[in-house]
Image (tube, rainbow, N blue to C red):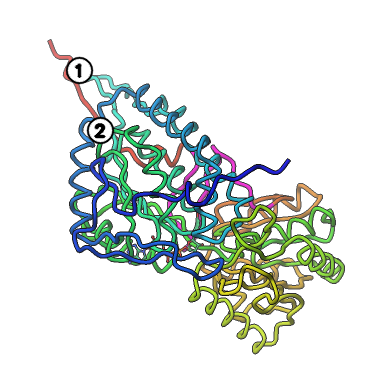
Amino acid sequence: MAPSLPSIEASLPKHKDLFYAGKWQAAKSGKRKPTYNPGNGEVIDEVSEAGSDDVDATVQAAHKAFHSWKLTPPAQRAATLRKVASIMREHAAELALVDALNTGNPVAEMLSDANVAAASLDYFAGLIPMLKGETIPQADDTFHYTLREPLGVVARIVAFNHPVMFAGAKMAAPLAAGNTVIIKPLEQAPLSCLRLAEILGGVFPPGVFNVLPGGVECGKALSTHTLVRKVTLIGSVPTGKAIAKAAADTLKPTLFELGGKNALIACRDADLDKLVVGVAKGMNFTWAGQSCGSTSRVFLHESLHDQVLEKVVDYVKREYREGVPTELSTTMGPVISKAAQDRVMSYIDSAKQEGAKLVCGGKAPEGIDGIEGGYFVEPTIFSDVKSDMRIAKEEIFGPVMAVFKWSDEAEMLRQVNSTEYGLTASVFTRDIATAQSLVKQLEVGFVWVNQVGRHFLGVPFGGYKESGGGREESLDELLSFTQTKSVNVSLAR
Ligand SMILES: NC(=O)c1ccc[n+]([C@@H]2O[C@H](COP(=O)([O-])OP(=O)(O)OC[C@H]3O[C@@H](n4cnc5c(N)ncnc54)[C@H](O)[C@@H]3O)[C@@H](O)[C@H]2O)c1
């Protein structure tokens, strides 16, 4: 039976201001910015926009709260995170609806986002006992041990594609380790994070958890503030570079989960049924390709290329249907903005001009009721793609798949590794030795074999090369929000 959804009116946040120091506060500049429904291009509401003065006030509040939060007994911190997880599960449908309205991602798929965040919160709550130090043996009169301590105020700047999932999942590790957190959602899709702050109410002491809707000014101020002890980004490579430069002035550590131009490699012995579904699903057409892990470059061995391409096109035409994002029957959403739609269309034009063959999509959908004015692009597939074309090299962050035909393994791997991105890859083969050989040669941080897209709590996720720095979704993430203090006790009598 299809789940029933709450009403949109009841799900939207009542507060549209900044949330810090445990209170809703208007932006000091009084600035408000419209936020849109990408499904029809209409304004949903206006939201306060945090500027650098607001960042300072928020950081001061978070800094003040840090001193008591870090001393809160570990079991109590864990219980608080579990309470957040349970509230998110309870409100999963309304959070999904708000994200569907504000990001355009279909609500049926977004229903799991709050649950994914809740699982992260539970996971990091359970890892708190791992925040332990060591004793170091020495043959002298001093006893050495280490303590793992939190860093202080952590700023988490997140992307727009899964706002509430990122807000919930990314607050978990720093808070578990005893830091206080400021979440900055993208200005285009802040509503679910505001609703999250509303439903969490007084779960955290004031200043421990803060939400600052805002744009580049807000992000820059967070990256440069002296009292922000670590800044993290889920976003694009250029933004990662800008933040790394800004953070350098205060020598702030960073954690980056950035873009990808990920390859799916199909070997001649691949299971064809699994492969066809993998190629289609790996592209994440459901949210218009807007996922860092999308396998947007598909390398099909020449022996199966034509057959698989034909089946993928059939599958995509059958399974992905654009529609109103807040309706449960919709299987594909728009891209986030008009600018994004124009950018995707310019990549499609460039591929045509550079000689790639359009086998599916390539334009905005027509004749679908209720999505006029929305920023939709049909699921698009190009074959005959060459590695010097723009669609082969640049992250499009839209529903555009580039298909390559290969015969020589060394040349195929050269092309796969030829971009500066290095986030994910997927390998389809029935032979474990072939899989292992390819895995070792891929310059990426996360590889799937005979599957795509899935994340697994406990398995480090992050990129090589320009796709990131640091690992998340694992013990590595928790420990990255701590620092080690060494203590040396004289035992001399
Ligand atoms: N690796 C991952 O886990 C992952 C997950 C999702 C998305 N992404 C990547 O995110 C990108 C798409 O998301 P986006 O369009 O929101 O990215 P973006 O880089 O445009 O923006 C990300 C965030 O950074 C802020 N920002 C922009 N300029 C800034 C600056 N100079 N200083 C500080 N903050 C600044 C934005 O306001 C936003 O909150 C894609 O490249 C995608 O691959 C990566």
Instruction: Say which label, 1 or 2, has the lower sequence index.
Output: 1
Quarter of the picture holding the N terminus: top right
- Image region (quadrant) for ligand 1: bottom left
Q: Residue 445 vs residue 441: left or right?
A: left
- Magenta-colored stretch includes residue 467: yes
User: Amino acid under label 2?
Assistant: Lys
Quarter of the picture holding the C terminus: top left
Q: Residue sitting at 24 percent across and 19 percent down?
A: 143
User: Amino acid under label 1?
Assistant: Asp
- Residue corresponding to mark 1: 141
Label 1 – label 2 distance at C-alpha: 20 Å
Q: Foreground mark, 1 or 2? A: 2
Which x, y percent locates residue 14?
37, 49
Q: Which of 325 and 11 is in front in this view?
A: 11
- Magenta-colored stretch includes residue 67: no
Q: In this view, does 63 lie above or below 338?
A: above
Q: Which residue lies furthest to the top in this view?
A: 493
Q: What's the magenta region?
A: 452-474
Residue 276 image label: none
Secondary structure found at label 1: loop
